[in-house]
Image (spheres, rainbow, N blue to C red):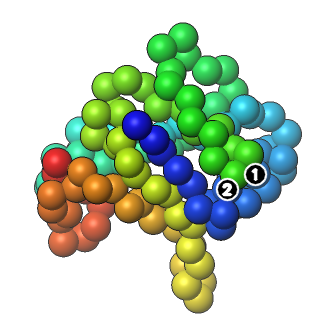
Amino acid sequence: MAITLTQNAADHIGRYLEKRGSGVGLRLGVRTSGCSGMAYKLEYVDQPQADDIVFESHGIKVYVDPQSLTYLDGTQLDYARDGLNESFKFSNPNEKATCGCGESFTV
């Protein structure tokens, strides 16, 4: 089981945590949403939860709740800029399909 970050994602998260002045890492999870059923959720972690599973990649801790890990195991998170647009990109081997707008997925 693993969740990894690319160097670009780790650098972006590290800069944001430093600028923010608090936080111990990033929480990655899933929620029910969208036309395909599930969507990714990201939030910065100030206080880890007791049942969190923690992965470290390029010096950044990624926290995942056990229920989300079922859908996220093997996922790599990247951060990319394209002109004025910037976003996190998910490479999830568990995805079977995504919706047309790219906001949700199924497993």
Q: For this view, does 93 lie left or right of residue 37?
A: right
Task: Give the image location of residue 57, x and y in percent.
Answer: 63, 47
What's the mark number on residue 95? none
Please name the residue that numbered disc 1 is placed on: 14
Q: Residue at x 72, y 32 (%)?
A: 24
Spatial CA distance of label 2 from label 1 is: 6 Å
Q: For this view, does 84 lie left or right of residue 102?
A: right
Please name the residue that numbered disc 2 is placed on: 10
Q: For this view, does 104 lie left or right of residue 16?
A: left
Q: Residue at x 83, y 50 (%)?
A: 19
Image position of 25 with respect to 93: above or below? above
Query: Residue 84 appears in which quarter of the rendering?
Result: bottom right
Image position of 46 with respect to 81: above or below? above
Can residue 103 be seen from the camera position used here? yes
Q: Residue at x 85, y 39 (%)?
A: 21
Q: Nearer the viewer, residue 50 or 54?
A: 54
> Pointers 2 and 1 in contact (CB under 8 A)?
yes
Which amino acid is tagged 2?
A: Ala
Task: Give the image location of residue 73, x and y in percent.
Answer: 36, 42
Callout 1: SS = helix
Q: For this view, does 87 lie left or right of residue 7?
A: left
Which amino acid is tagged 1?
A: Gly
Image position of 10 with respect to 46: above or below? below
Can residue 105 be seen from the camera position used here? no
Q: Considering the image in quadrants, where does the N terminus appear?
A: top left
Work out which residue is located at the far top of the displayed protein and give it: 50
Q: Residue at x 54, y 11 (%)?
A: 50
Task: Give the image location of residue 17, x and y in percent.
Answer: 76, 45
Q: Nearer the viewer, residue 79 or 76?
A: 76
Q: Residues within 10 Å of mark 2 (few under 14, many from 20)?
A: many
Query: Residue 93 appears in which quarter of the rendering?
Result: bottom left
